[in-house]
Amino acid sequence: MSLLLQIQQTGNTIQDTLSQATTVLASTPAPAPEFSLWELILKGGPIMIPIGILSIAGLYIFFERYFTIRRSSKMDANFTSQIRDFMHHGNTDAARALCKNTNTPVARMLEKGLMRLGKPIKEIEGAIENV
């Protein structure tokens, strides 16, 4: 008799568990349908066109500025030592020519400073700051 009671209780427990599981499954929302990137862009409508164009323009400007700044920030170790040697020997024309032939921001600033040699320090500093 006790065996029959155990089987009946187990059957009731299984039935209760199944009814609870179906209730939980029925209350959970269905998974959202998956969209590809292209479908999402098309669903965005005409506003996506300017967003795409501006994204491409932003990436272009970012990389262009990055490479320009990186190229400009490279400093040649020989450049400053050559300028120093020319100035110690009093050869300002050669130092100015070297600055003119070197395409870096430092060379342009030094060239403006060398062009103003013999003038007051404030004027030389102003010329360098303007460049």
Image (cartoon, helix red, strand yellow):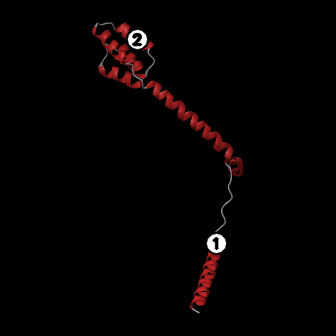
Q: In the image, residue 116 lies at what x, y percent?
A: 35, 15
Q: Quadrant of the C terminus?
A: top left
Q: Amino acid at mark 2?
A: Leu
For marks 2 and 1 on the same chain, the one whose residue lies earlier in the sequence: 1
Query: Residue at the location (39% across, 19% down)?
Result: 76
Query: Residue at the location (64% across, 44% down)?
Result: 51
Residue at the outermost bottom position:
1
Residue 129 sits above or below residue 30 on the image: above
Q: Amino acid at mark 1?
A: Leu
Numbered circle sitting on residue 25? 1
Q: Which is closer to the viewer, label 2 or label 1?
A: 1
Residue under label 2: 98
Foreground: 43 or 37?
Answer: 37
Residue 28 sits above or below residue 74 on the image: below
Figure quadrant of residue 34: bottom right
The kind of secondary structure element at disc 1 is helix
Residue 23 sits above or below residue 43 on the image: below
Query: Residue at the location (34% across, 20% down)?
Result: 124
Query: Residue at the location (50% across, 28% down)?
Result: 67
Residue at the outermost left position:
88
| Left or right side of 67 for 20 | right
Figure quadrant of residue 16: bottom right
Q: In the image, residue 114 lies at what x, y percent?
A: 36, 14
The kind of secondary structure element at disc 2 is helix
- Crowding near the residue tagged with mark 2, few <14, some 14–19, many ≥20 C-alpha atoms within 10 Å: some
Foreground: 30 or 69?
Answer: 30
Q: In the image, residue 86 lies at what x, y percent?
A: 32, 9
| Left or right side of 127 for 52 | right
Numbered circle sitting on residue 128? none
